[in-house]
Image (cartoon, helix red, strand yellow):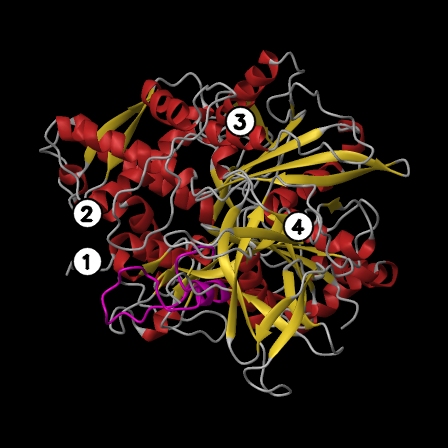
């Protein structure tokens, strides 16, 4: 709060005004009661609040390893990305990419339900209402003024609607993305 | 206990198992509340997924092959046997430890079905198991999956229908019923798979089926699964003004299915690669088969594609450098798949039977002719008179050279490629047109992979709650061989006569039948009878004695045997008995030997499932 503290006169006006309103408005009374007990409550939201320091969380590696293992098993993704593609022709890379594409696509279909964030076709004009979900929609370019914003949909976005990852036995070592194979 | 909540249908398939169930408490009339059981199974070491299909594969791992904890399932399991998806995957790289097509072994007449013989030809240190045990294993997996989900309505308290191929002989049916009893199922009924497919269609129409078929219709069910082809004819009849379905004929057991088709395409591409100097090893051929299956489905689904690239991934980690690329073209699909498996043949075509070369070991009796349409032509011609004596039925044309179906229902994963449905229908309609008969129409089936399980659950439900039933009874008439009384002639086998013990169409639960002829059996000594079945001799009555018959009318089956116990009689005594036959409520054939002189006693006559060497 950067505004200066009110003078004695102003405070008297506030006190009398509040006194009357506490009798008329139960919500206001509750807010005042909370003010008296809890110093953190502030009544009207500020226009721009500085983000409080939040502890950063590290995602548990298990789910990432599990998904990577599936992408390797079905689509040989780790093999593909670990290979140096400089020495191969586009045709050779393309042939391998079919294996990767087909297998990884199956993983996405089987274990996740992925839907576009916006259903409109890309290139169409869309309007963002006040209070749009900024984590799901990112306005870019001339971001000035107040919503509603109108602009062109460049990318529909992707949202995971459902996950159906396999269940694991407790002893399973997820760090093994692919077991080494030894033919006897 | 007496009022099971769920009606459960189990499709115990050659390549996949599935379980569907109807909640009978919530179902009313033709509004059926039905669901599929998602079956938890290992998909890789340590990872369990619930999937609608359980691949019918068993893998017998080496004790050091997996960490014991990686083979756990949500229930107590025997880690010396892995079932389902992981078994299938692991079998690709280590086939000597894989059991596949256990169901085809279950009806193999030349082996002991309860002897540990699978995987066939496995090294001595691998503990083999019997085809019967393998079936028990799959059923137990389904039971445990069910009980995990319905702890307060365990499977053994539910009404269960298990499906069998229509072509299963009485011995294989008995083994299937025994396997189901082995996992504790008490209220069991067996149902033929093509009938289950038709039940599923009836259920999907929600009563509309009465508008889609009429009296006089003959529905041909063509079921081509992963490993077998099953054919049935079901007639639409009338009883007291209501439509009825009657199964009038079933085909022979044909080991021919979608796996053959994928393999045919893989070998085609393997040869194509060999011409360019690329040789594939066994693992690569497996991977190629897998790739061909996907390419086939894509090509058949999209008529505008001329070819599809097929890539055999490298086995090592160098994916780009080690992968082999080839193409499957539409022309190749048409030549190999459509002309090879579904050729446009005349109605008079018959499957080619080459004499087999000497076999060094017992294998599955795979169909020698891959043409499904030729097997179909032979089946329809053989059954030309199938509807002849059906009460209340519009007679078929007397000049017909084959039985003329008026509607066709397809089932099995192969027909997910709709061009193959169209092809079979087109060939069939050419046969019909050549005899100036009206074209057969297509009955639209839903979900070709799961229809059998769904239909079986629907059947289990309507059995107790009323609804349409497919009648049928035994699909064959059965005979025992009787030596005729004539002087012995050197070098001549005594002539054999066939005594009809079970008439065609004997229905389950109907009173037992017994031919008047008596047999003298020696107490304490095992007695064997030669046993014959016929799918075409519909007129023979119990007690009819056939002196001669056409070679293709009667098929000899595994023998039947009995031993009169010595508890009440003296060993060596000769007892006059009659053979009595009944079809149990379960749907299995039951033969008993009943002494003529005294009531109360009877001895079970068992089907020999121990093979010829026993």
Pinpoint the chain carrying mark 3: B
Q: Could you tell me which chain the residue with mark 2 belongs to? A: B
User: Quadrant location of residue B584?
Assistant: bottom right
Which residue is label 2 attached to?
A: B315
Q: In the structure shown, which secondary structural element does the residue marked by tag 4 occupy?
A: loop
Q: Quadrant of residue B217?
A: top right
Real-space Cα separation, disc 4 to disc 3, in angstroms: 29 Å
Q: CA distance from mark 1 to mark 3?
A: 42 Å
Whether label 4 touches label 3, CB < 8 Å: no
Residue at the disc numbered 3: B421
Which residue position holds label 4? B474
Instruction: Please tell me whether mark 3 or mark 2 is closer to you in this view.
Output: 3
- The tag earlier along the polypeptide, 3 or 2, is 2
Which dot, 1 or 4, sits closer to the camera?
4
Verify CB contact (< 8 Å) between mark 3 and mark 2.
no
From this view, report whether residue B154 is shown above or below residue A58. Answer: below
Residue at figure coordinates x 79%, y 31% from the top left? B393
Mark 2: which secondary structure?
Answer: loop
Residue indicated by mark 1: A181
Quarter occupied by the C terminus of chain B: bottom left
On the image, the x and y values in percent for residue B519 come to 62, 66
Segment colored magenta:
B107-136
Q: Is residue B150 visible?
A: no
């Amino acid at each position: 709060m950067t505004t200066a503290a009110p003078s004695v006169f102003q405070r008297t006006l506030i006190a009398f005004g509040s006194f009357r309103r506490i009798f008329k408005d139960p919500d206001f009374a509750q807010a005042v009661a909370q003010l008296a007990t809890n110093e953190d409550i502030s009544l009207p939201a500020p226009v721009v609040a500085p983000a409080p320091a939040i502890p950063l969380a590290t995602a548990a590696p298990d789910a990432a390893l599990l998904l990577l293992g599936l992408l390797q098993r079905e689509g040989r993704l780790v093999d593909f990305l670990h290979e140096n593609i400089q020495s191969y022709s586009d045709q050779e890379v393309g042939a391998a990419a079919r294996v990767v594409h087909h297998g990884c696509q199956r993983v996405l279909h089987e274990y996740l339900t992925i839907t576009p964030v916006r259903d409109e076709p890309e290139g169409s004009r869309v309007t963002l209402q006040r209070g749009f979900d900024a984590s799901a929609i990112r306005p870019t370019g001339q971001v000035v003024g107040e919503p509603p914003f109108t602009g062109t949909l460049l990318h529909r976005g992707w949202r995971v609607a459902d996950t159906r990852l396999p269940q694991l036995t407790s002893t399973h070592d997820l760090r093994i993305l692919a077991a080494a194979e030894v033919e006897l | 206990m007496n009022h099971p909540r769920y009606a459960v249908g189990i499709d115990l398939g050659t390549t996949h198992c599935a379980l569907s169930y109807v909640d009978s408490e919530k179902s009313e009339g033709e509004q059926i509340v039905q669901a599929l059981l998602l079956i938890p199974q290992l998909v890789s070491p340590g990872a369990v997924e619930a999937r609608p299909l359980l691949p019918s594969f068993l893998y017998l791992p080496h004790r050091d092959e997996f960490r014991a904890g990686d083979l756990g399932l949500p229930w107590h399991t025997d880690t010396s046997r892995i079932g389902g998806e992981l078994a299938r995957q692991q079998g690709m790289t280590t086939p000597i430890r894989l059991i596949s097509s256990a169901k085809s072994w279950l009806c193999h007449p030349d082996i002991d079905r309860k002897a540990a013989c699978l995987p066939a030809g496995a090294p001595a240190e691998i503990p083999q198991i019997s085809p019967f045990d393998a079936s028990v294993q799959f059923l137990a997996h389904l039971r445990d999956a069910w009980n995990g989900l319905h702890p307060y309505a365990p499977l053994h308290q539910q009404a269960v229908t298990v499906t069998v191929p229509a072509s299963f002989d009485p011995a294989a049916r008995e083994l299937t019923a025994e396997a189901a009893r082995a996992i504790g199922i008490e209220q069991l009924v067996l149902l033929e798979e093509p009938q289950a497919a038709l039940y599923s269609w009836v259920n999907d129409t929600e009563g509309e089926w009465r508008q889609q078929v009429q009296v006089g219709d003959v529905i041909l069910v063509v079921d081509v699964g992963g490993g077998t082809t099953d054919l049935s004819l079901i007639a639409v009849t009338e009883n007291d003004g209501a439509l009825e379905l009657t199964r009038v004929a079933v085909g022979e057991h044909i080991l021919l299915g979608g796996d053959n088709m994928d393999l045919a395409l893989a070998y085609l591409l393997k040869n194509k690669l060999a011409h360019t100097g690329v040789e594939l090893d066994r693992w690569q051929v497996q991977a190629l088969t897998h790739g061909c299956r996907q390419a086939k489905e894509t090509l058949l689904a999209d008529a505008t594609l001329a070819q599809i690239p097929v890539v055999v991934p490298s086995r090592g980690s160098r994916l780009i450098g080690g992968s082999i690329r080839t193409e499957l073209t539409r022309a190749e699909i048409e030549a190999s798949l459509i002309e090879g498996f579904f050729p446009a043949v005349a109605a008079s075509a018959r499957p080619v039977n080459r004499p087999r070369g000497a076999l060094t070991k017992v294998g599955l009796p795979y169909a020698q002719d891959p043409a499904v349409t030729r097997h179909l032509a032979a089946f329809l011609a053989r059954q030309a008179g199938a509807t002849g004596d059906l009460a209340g039925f519009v007679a078929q044309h007397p000049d017909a050279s084959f039985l003329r179906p008026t509607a066709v229902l397809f089932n099995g994963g192969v027909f997910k490629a709709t061009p193959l449905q169209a092809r079979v229908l087109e060939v069939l309609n050419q046969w019909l047109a050549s005899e100036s008969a009206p074209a057969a129409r297509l009955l639209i089936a839903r979900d070709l992979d799961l229809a059998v399980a769904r239909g079986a659950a629907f059947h289990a439900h309507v059995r107790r709650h009323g609804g349409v039933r497919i009648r049928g009874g035994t699909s064959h008439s059965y005979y025992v061989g009787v030596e005729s009384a004539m002087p012995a002639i050197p070098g001549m086998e005594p002539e054999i006569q066939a005594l009809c013990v079970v008439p065609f169409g004997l229905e389950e639960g109907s009173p037992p039948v017994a031919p008047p002829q008596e047999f003298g059996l020696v107490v304490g000594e095992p007695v064997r009878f030669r046993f014959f079945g016929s799918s075409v001799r519909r007129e023979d009555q119990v007690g009819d004695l056939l002196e001669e018959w056409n070679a293709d009318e009667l098929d000899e089956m595994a023998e039947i045997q009995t031993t009169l116990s010595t508890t009440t009689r003296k060993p060596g005594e000769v007892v006059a008995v009659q053979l009595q036959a009944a079809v149990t409520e379960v749907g299995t054939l039951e033969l008993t030997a009943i002494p003529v002189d005294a009531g109360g006693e009877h001895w079970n006559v068992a089907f020999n499932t121990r093979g010829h060497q026993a």
